[in-house]
Image: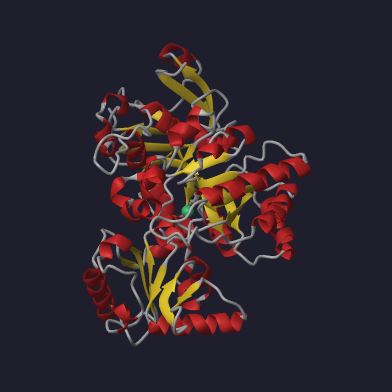
């Protein structure tokens, strides 16, 4: 029954769905009625990979979105420095390597003459690369010497050993800086959760959470502001030792219900192709010496995965390159053989570049590919294409071939890396284009894209028994849309608005306009 006329719910769960007369017969005389005026109602969207905590921290950062040039970045940073003398550190987010148009990666000197009185750190739109001024580099070196180890993968000039100002894993470094931690607040999280809800998201998987972040979610829930159901993966940074695992397990036991469900661990095996830090089977285009590094040696990674699998965790591995993907698949296969476990639904995040021989292994091993449609857009991939070359570009972001082999594809935004709006992501999946502007054979149908953002994502969150479709017994989590997506040209899908978001039978977002 793909289509229905109405549904009824009680105590947060769907009681009846189908023809209006059957639904009406299922409700009592005092029932509240929401007439959607014939509009399209879908299951609430499920964002299977998003960073709501990290995103709210960015809310107070210098906005470097819109692909500013190097000069424009310098202008925005200078303006912020002038307007905010009270800030101890300047933070910016969203610059795009390509748009800088400098013919090279940026350096600390590019920032020193606009901010020299305090540290400044700018992160790229993908959140990986950080670009700091000399004061920030000095601050980072201090933090590392306090910790007694390298953090954040600071780049150095191979000739002089002098730090260049670039960091390849800034997100490991910035949480250690107290002036950044002070900016975190439950109020900020409340705003980003409300923004997700306004886009029709009813469940979100925050894939990189530490103990403080989890505490913020719990506080928000206690204050009645958690209107999106959360699945959570605890972050396992490089260098985490086994002594941390009992704490991960304790946190997981503490929060396992339909509002906060901590059941997963997030690890990285590689970086991103744009900075040639994704791990490839064959060398990067134009550089026969480099296949990209991995965070762990394959044998070490296999040990870690086996241990976490035995402890009952779902594992989410970040892998963008085909070698990274293969190492993750092999570690999952080895854990299943050794531990005899099944249905752990281990995931690979991004899967941007998958060797053709590995595509069918996802379905065979029960591994979930979690992918972001917007990331495949030609306007965001010029440096990606340059790094991987035409042959790998042609088979990049293989949603279609993964689906064809029976893999359980889940879609996600990766916000704040890309738009939080599921309708924008679904549009990009349906009208996916090649760099030359022609429609890509890798695009999906509207039904497939919606499926990956609802039912597929629910499966990736271990939530398909309660979410992802509108069925009797499942949560009454749904959205009312302003336009019928099935009647719209693909390129207009993103213009539809979410008029109501309902979670557990309760309206948690309304755009204000009456539905009738
Ligand atoms: Zn992410």
Image position of 294 (left or right of 202): right
Q: Residue at x 34, y 82 (%)?
A: 86
Q: Position of residue 445 (x, y in %)?
A: 37, 28
**In the image, residue 439 above or below residue 126:** above
Residue, x 25% and y 38% (percent of image)? Answer: 495
Residue 18 visible = yes
Percent position (x, y) of residue 191?
40, 56
The answer to whether any part of residue 261 appears in the image is no
Q: Position of residue 336 (x, y in %)?
A: 72, 41
**Which residue is most to the bottom?**
117
Q: Please name the residue shown 51% across and 48% down the image.
A: 322
Q: Quadrant of residue 386?
A: bottom left
Position of residue 338 relative to residue 182, above or below, is above
Number of numbered tags placed on the structure image:
0
Camera-side residue of 48 and 101? 101
Picture quadrant of residue 431: top left
In the foreground, 470 or 98: 98
Percent position of residue 443, x then y: 36, 33
Question: Does 512 sit left or right of 207 as displayed?
Answer: left
Give the position of the C terminus as an image quadrant. top left
Q: Residue at x 29, y 60 (%)?
A: 98
- Residue with the most extreme front position: 288
């Amino acid at each position: 029954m793909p289509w229905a006329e109405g549904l009824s719910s009680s105590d947060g769960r769907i009681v009846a769905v189908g023809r209006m007369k059957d639904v009406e017969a299922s409700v009592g005389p005092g029932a509240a009625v929401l007439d959607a005026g014939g509009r399209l109602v879908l299951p609430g969207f499920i964002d299977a990979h998003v960073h709501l905590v990290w995103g709210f921290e960015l809310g107070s950062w210098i906005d470097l979105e819109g692909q500013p040039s190097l000069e424009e970045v310098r202008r925005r940073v200078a303006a912020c420095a002038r307007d905010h003398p009270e800030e101890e550190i300047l933070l910016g987010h969203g610059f795009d390597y390509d748009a800088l148009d400098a013919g090279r990666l940026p350096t600390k000197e590019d920032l020193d003459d606009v901010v020299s009185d305090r540290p400044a750190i700018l992160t790229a739109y993908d959140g990986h690369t950080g670009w700091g001024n000399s004061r920030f580099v000095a601050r980072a070196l201090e933090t590392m010497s306090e910790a007694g180890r390298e953090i954040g993968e600071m780049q150095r000039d191979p000739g002089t050993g002098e730090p260049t100002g670039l960091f390849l894993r800034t997100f490991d470094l910035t949480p250690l800086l107290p002036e950044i931690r002070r900016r975190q607040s439950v109020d900020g999280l409340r705003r980003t959760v409300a923004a997700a809800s306004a886009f029709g998201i009813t469940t979100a998987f925050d894939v990189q959470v530490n103990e403080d972040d989890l505490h913020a979610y719990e506080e928000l829930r206690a204050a009645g502001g958690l209107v999106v159901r959360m699945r959570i993966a605890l972050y396992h940074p490089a260098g985490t030792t086994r002594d941390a695992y009992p704490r991960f397990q304790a946190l997981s036991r503490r929060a396992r219900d339909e509002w906060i469900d901590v059941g997963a661990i997030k690890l990285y095996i590689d970086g991103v192709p744009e900075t040639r830090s994704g791990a490839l089977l064959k060398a990067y285009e134009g550089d026969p010496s480099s296949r990209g590094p991995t965070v762990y040696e394959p044998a070490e990674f296999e040990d870690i995965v086996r241990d976490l699998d035995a402890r009952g965790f779902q594992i989410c591995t970040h892998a963008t390159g085909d070698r990274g993907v293969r190492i993750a698949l092999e570690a999952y296969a080895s854990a299943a053989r050794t531990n005899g476990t099944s249905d752990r639904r281990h995931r690979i995040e991004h899967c941007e570049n998958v060797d053709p021989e590995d595509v069918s292994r996802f379905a065979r091993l029960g591994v979930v590919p979690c992918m972001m449609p917007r990331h495949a857009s030609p306007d965001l991939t010029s440096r990606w294409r340059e790094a991987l070359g035409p042959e790998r570009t042609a088979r990049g972001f293989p949603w279609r071939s993964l689906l064809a082999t029976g893999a359980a594809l889940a879609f996600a935004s990766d916000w704040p890396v890309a738009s939080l709006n599921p309708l924008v992501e679904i549009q990009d999946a349906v009208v996916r284009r090649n760099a030359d502007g022609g429609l890509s054979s890798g695009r999906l149908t509207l039904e497939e894209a919606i499926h990956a953002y609802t039912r597929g994502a629910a499966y990736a969150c271990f939530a398909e028994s309660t979410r992802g479709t509108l069925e009797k017994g499942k949560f009454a989590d749904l959205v009312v849309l302003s336009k019928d997506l099935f009647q719209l040209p693909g390129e207009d899908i993103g213009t539809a608005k979410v008029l109501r978001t309902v979670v557990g039978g309760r309206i948690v977002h309304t755009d204000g306009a009456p539905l009738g």
